[in-house]
Amino acid sequence: MNLIDRPCPHCSSVHTNPIAVYSKELWKIVSCAECEFVYLHNAPDYDTLQNNFEWEASSKAERSLRRKDKKLYYFFSDTLKQIKFFFRKGQRKEIMILENLKLSGKTIDVGCGDGFTLSQMPIGFTPFGVEISKPLAKLANERCSERGGYVINADAVNGLKQFSQNFADLIIMRSYLEHEINPLEVLRSAEYCLKSNGVILIKVPNFASVNRKIKGIKWPGFRFPDHVNYFTPQSLVNMIESASLSVDRFNFLDRIPTSDNMWMLVGKPKA
Ligand SMILES: [Zn+2]
């Protein structure tokens, strides 16, 4: 396993304040001394991620262990999810947001996994993706090619560079940016690929959530070492602006502190 000691993913400072209470075994959570961004200091590099599928297996094992530990909590949490799902008439939240936006066109899902989200896109979207895992990229490519798109097997920075300027109407980063060791560089590449009226849809865990404050290191948002960035509403806004992008929508319900996750719509700055 190759581990790299990262400078701050937002401002590149090498000065850090350790957060001992959230560090586990060899994994060190730190806060940047300059901009206060919270991140995993020592993270696996792209080669390790690409060639080692222990991460997928280890995070699955951790999830099932948590479920056994906290049966009652997960019972309520699952029930609440089902109720929300019922009120959304069975639609996934991202699909609902997209339908409200009345968007269509070329869509790039960054970190698209097996292409499931892309395969659920409404008619009118042509699905494209970038995925670092070879077997998942192959599966996703089969799904996308049925609808006129394709998937690039690469890390996100290099994958996005293979699309032309102003290519995408929509870029999806759902449960992805928290895994990315170079989030600012990826957002800059996304800015290049995005059309002037295009939209980036982001979903990340909210480090400022009430649940994190109550549960501490047992908060489900902590996953060692696959979550490498821990965004708060403010640090997410800061990073978007540093990538020359602008926040289009980030209302109270998108970042409600009782939820473990937050959603954001991002675009290019309007002239
Ligand atoms: Zn910083």
Image: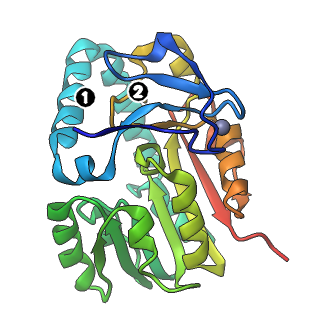
Mark 1 vs mark 2, CA separation in Å: 11 Å
Secondary structure under tag 2 reads loop
Q: Which quarter holds ligand 1?
A: top right
Residue drawn at x 21%, y 38% is: 1
Residue, disc 2: 222
SS for dot 1: helix
Q: Is residue 247 left or right of 25 when viewed as pictured? A: right
Q: Which residue is mark 1?
A: 63
Q: Could you tell whether 218 is left or right of 35 in the image? A: left
Query: From what the image shows, is residue 149 above or below residue 136?
Result: below
Q: Position of residue 137 (x, y in %)?
A: 22, 67
In the depicted view, which residue is nearer to us: 238 or 185?
A: 185
Give the side of residue 90 with respect to residue 100, left or right: left
Q: Residue 29: give x, y in percent of width and height.
A: 48, 24
Q: Name the residue at 40% across, 45% down.
A: 179
Q: Is residue 48 above or below residue 79?
A: below
Q: Residue at x 31, y 67 (%)?
A: 154
Whether residue 208 is visible? no
Where residue 21 appears, as percent x and y from the top left, is 48, 10
